[in-house]
Amino acid sequence: MNLRFSIIIPSYNEGDDIRLSIESALNQDYLEREILVIDDSHDNTPSIIQEYERMGVRLIKGKQNGCCGARNFGIETAIGDIVVLLNADVVLPKDFLNRLAAHYHSGADYVLVESLTFNTDRFFARFTEMQYRNYEYARLGEKIEWTEGFSARREALLKIGLIPGNFKLRFCRDWLLGLGLKNAGFKKVIDRSIVVSHKSPDNFKEYWMVRKARGRFGALMQYFLYKKSISFLIFKFIAKDVIFILRFLTILPSFTRAYKISNYPRSPFKDVVLFWWAYFLQELARAIGEWEGIKLVIRNK
């Protein structure tokens, strides 16, 4: 019996990128699938999505409750056996669903795949990719619970209650899906031979906004999800900022990190100075974002 896949794409003002995920989803050589775009946009994104409706893409108006809310809404609306969660800038290989199907027929409950940045000709995107590969991904190893192209049995996601939390302020917590499935005893498969590609921020404005948002989300997550007090967060962020200042004033620790991140096969170490600059901007944006998160919590108490 063939499995049916539901590809779910949340979108918010994704006019520049939405064609990437939709067209790669339509290009799959596995035909038992539906494509749902949960859209909360205020730009031209809905009109772009409508161009693909005659090909079977469903445009669903979101409830303006953030990316996690859009993902949950999409999972509840889907009719497939397996749910695939994509961002608007993700490109799937043509055999993606076929290769996933083999794992689910073999008993997997959720599958994590490899993801690579496709715009590494731009140094901000290259820094993001190499930092992820040489630090974050390498550190997590088999403990990783979320990747681009995440998929799971819809029934399993419904059993764990989808992405938890209905908080007053929104913050990204999609990774809780994988953690929830793990804690509930569902079977995980990691297949790094299945590779999806995605776009990373490749200019100063996008890079700064994304890094600052991560800091802000980190503060909101600590407060709402982990129940940390405001006084605890203030103390923690002051300590982190002191370490950040010392790391860059003394130069060596920050340059050592940039040196290690820049060590990748295509061109070893050529980006050390640029990566040091990107690393500095990342930590500065993170610090500003965390304090913005504190301000939001205090303002909305």
Image (tube, rainbow, N blue to C red):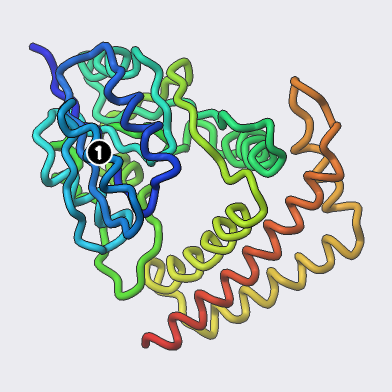
Q: Is residue 108 left or right of residue 284?
A: left
Task: Name the foreground residue: 127 vs 56.
Answer: 56
Q: Residue at x 36, y 67 (%)?
A: 170
Q: Is residue 21 left or right of residue 237?
A: left
**Residue 110, horizontal then vertical, whole percent:** 29, 30
Q: Quadrant of the N terminus?
A: top left
User: For the residue marked with disc 1, what is the amino acid?
Assistant: Ile
In this picture, is 235 found above or below 123?
Answer: below
**Residue 35, horizontal then vertical, whole percent:** 21, 32
Q: Is residue 289 left or right of residue 96?
A: right
* Mark 1 neighbour density, 10 Å: few (under 14) some (14–19) many (20 or more): many
Q: Quadrant of the C terminus?
A: bottom left
Q: Residue at x 14, y 23 (%)?
A: 4
Residue position for label 1: 8
**Residue 248, horizontal then vertical, whole percent:** 84, 61
Task: Name the foreground residue: 157 vs 40.
Answer: 40
Task: Name the foreground residue: 3 vs 176.
Answer: 3
Q: Residue at x 30, y 54 (%)?
A: 68
Number of labels in the image equals 1
Instruction: Report helix, strand or loop for mark 1.
Output: strand
In this picture, is 47 found above or below 23?
Answer: below
In this picture, is 192 found above or below 137?
Answer: above
Q: Residue at x 33, y 26 (%)?
A: 23
Q: Quadrant of residue 37?
A: top left
